[in-house]
Amino acid sequence: MNLKDHIRSIKDYPKKGILFRDITTLIKNEKAFAKCIEEIVDKSKKFKVDKIAAIEARGFVFASAVSYILKKPFILLRKKNKLPAERYAVDFQLEYGKATMEIHKDSINKNDSVLLIDDLIATGGTAEAAAKLIEISNGSVAGFIFVINLFDLGGAKNLTEKGYKVENLIDFPGH
């Protein structure tokens, strides 16, 4: 099965000039979703992992299933003011705006090795913010696994150049 065949592309969403890669068509197909999770689990074996973290919101879909299969704690990285307890925050740039991501201060223990999972990497701003949150929480980033890499936008390459290990399942151009 080619997972790429289960990704819908939508022009000019969420704004003109963006080609949006929609994972809802993949996750609504039980065989494609199962294959996707199996591939992420297989790639996760390349990393030493104490915990799994995901970026809100689509990353939760994939990471929670992987966390369950690997029997590892699942950590939520959320948008500003969505977590109720004490938290760390990082501001970052998106392709089309600014955002803040947060993590509960008690989510990660010193030296925990955390695997970050998300649906897609484009320019890498969100992924870098996630890595900063793990690191200010005294954990280390085991690596990243993305379902989709928009290779021509350079995010995965940027993370690799910063010393992070990066894996992905599908490559698409970003335009």
Image (cartoon, helix red, strand yellow):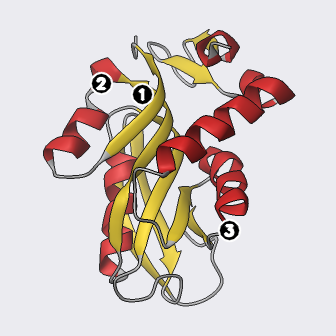
Is 63 above or below relative to 31? below
Which residue in the structure is indicated by mark 3? 71
Q: Residues within 10 Å of mark 2 (few under 14, many from 20)?
A: some
Q: Earlier in the sequence, mark 2 or mark 3?
A: 3
Is 37 above or below relative to 165? above
Residue displayed at 68% across by 68% down: 71
Q: Which mark is residue 94?
A: none
* CA distance separating discs 1 and 3: 26 Å
Image quadrant where one finds the N terminus: top right
Viewer-proximal residue among 35 and 7: 35
> Disc 1 vs disc 3: Cβ atoms closer than 8 Å?
no
* CA distance separating discs 2 and 3: 33 Å
Image quadrant where one finds the C terminus: top left
Amino acid type of the residue that numbered disc 3 sits on in the rendered structure: Lys
Residue displayed at 49% across by 50% down: 44
Which residue in the structure is indicated by mark 2? 153
Residue 163, x across and y down, in percent: 17, 52
Is 170 above or below relative to 157? above
Amino acid type of the residue that numbered disc 2 sits on in the rendered structure: Leu
Q: Nearer the viewer, mark 1 or mark 3?
A: 3
Q: Residues within 10 Å of mark 1 (few under 14, many from 20)?
A: many
* CA distance separating discs 1 and 2: 9 Å
**Residue 79 seen in this snapshot:** no
Secondary structure state at the residue bearing disc 3: loop
Amino acid type of the residue that numbered disc 1 sits on in the rendered structure: Asn
Secondary structure state at the residue bearing disc 2: helix
Residue 17, x across and y down, in percent: 44, 13
Secondary structure state at the residue bearing disc 1: strand
Q: Residues within 10 Å of mark 3 (few under 14, many from 20)?
A: few
Residue 165, x across and y down, in percent: 29, 48
Which residue in the structure is indicated by mark 1? 149
Q: Nearer the viewer, mark 2 or mark 3?
A: 3
